[in-house]
Amino acid sequence: MSRSGTTIVEELRASGLRVTAPRRAVLEWLIDHPHATVEQVHLGVAARMGTISKQAVYDVLSACVEANLVRQIKPAGHPARFERRTGDNHHHLVCRGCGRIADTDCRRGTMPCLSPEHDHGFDIDEAEVVFWGLCTECRSDRHDTNDEAS
């Protein structure tokens, strides 16, 4: 079962996409591996399926992003990442040290969670927020390094 209680086959069909082994494998793999790069998806799916080209993974991800079955995020200075969590109002935390990404729900709850000072006539329905900082492990490593230098 996928995230909403429907099967991946049902999700693909409801989105108007053909059900193929590569699409099923990519979507299944992403359930347990959010924020994965194309390279990670390719390696993970190839381990399950045997062989799949990286281009096939790109094609599957592109079609699934278009169908809103997968969300693509592009943190500055990092490769694109993909996740199955779509259609909600969540944001991301990115570690400047190790690049780890974590989800965080919007405190406001409704979309968009931010409003610009001037909308220039746009009908705004979403705001993308990326929080940057250091994760617990990188902060700990930084403290350990500073302690050794003292």
Image (spheres, rainbow, N blue to C red):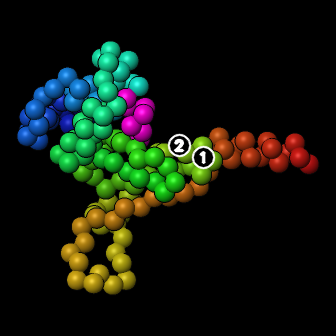
* For the residues bearing labels 1 and 2, Cβ distance under 8 angstroms: yes
Nearer-the-camera pick, 133 or 82:
82
From the top left corner, tell me how far across and down residue 87 is, in percent.
Answer: 24, 51
From the top left corner, tell me how far across and down residue 111 is, in percent.
Answer: 28, 64
Q: Is residue 115 above or below residue 53?
A: below
Q: Residue at x 34, y 41 (%)?
A: 83
Q: Amino acid at mark 2?
A: Arg
From the top left corner, tell me how far across and down residue 52 is, in percent.
Answer: 30, 23
- Residue 47 sits in which quadrant? top left
Q: Secondary structure at mark 1?
A: loop
Is 78 placed left or right of 119 in the picture? Answer: right
Q: Secondary structure at mark 2?
A: loop
- Mark 1 and mark 2 lie on one chain; the one further toward the N terminus is 2
Q: Residue at x 57, y 49 (%)?
A: 95
Is 23 placed left or right of 58 in the picture? Answer: left
Is 33 placed left or right of 65 in the picture? Answer: right
Q: Is residue 107 magenta?
A: no
Q: Is residue 21 visible?
A: yes
Give the class, few, some or many, for how many residues have Cα within 10 Å of label 1's Cα (few <14, many ≥20): some
Nearer-the-camera pick, 149 or 89:
149
Magenta range: 33-42
Residue identified by numbered label 2: 100
Nearer-the-camera pick, 122 or 90:
122
From the top left corner, tell me how far across and down residue 60 is, in percent.
Answer: 24, 36
Q: Count how many numbered circles sit on residues in the image.
A: 2
Q: Is residue 1 visible?
A: no
Q: Residue at x 23, y 78 (%)?
A: 122
Alpha carbons under labels 1 and 2: distance apart: 8 Å
Give the class, few, some or many, for how many residues have Cα within 10 Å of label 2's Cα (few <14, many ≥20): few
Residue identified by numbered label 1: 135
- Residue 9 sits in which quadrant? top left
Q: Amino acid at mark 1?
A: Cys
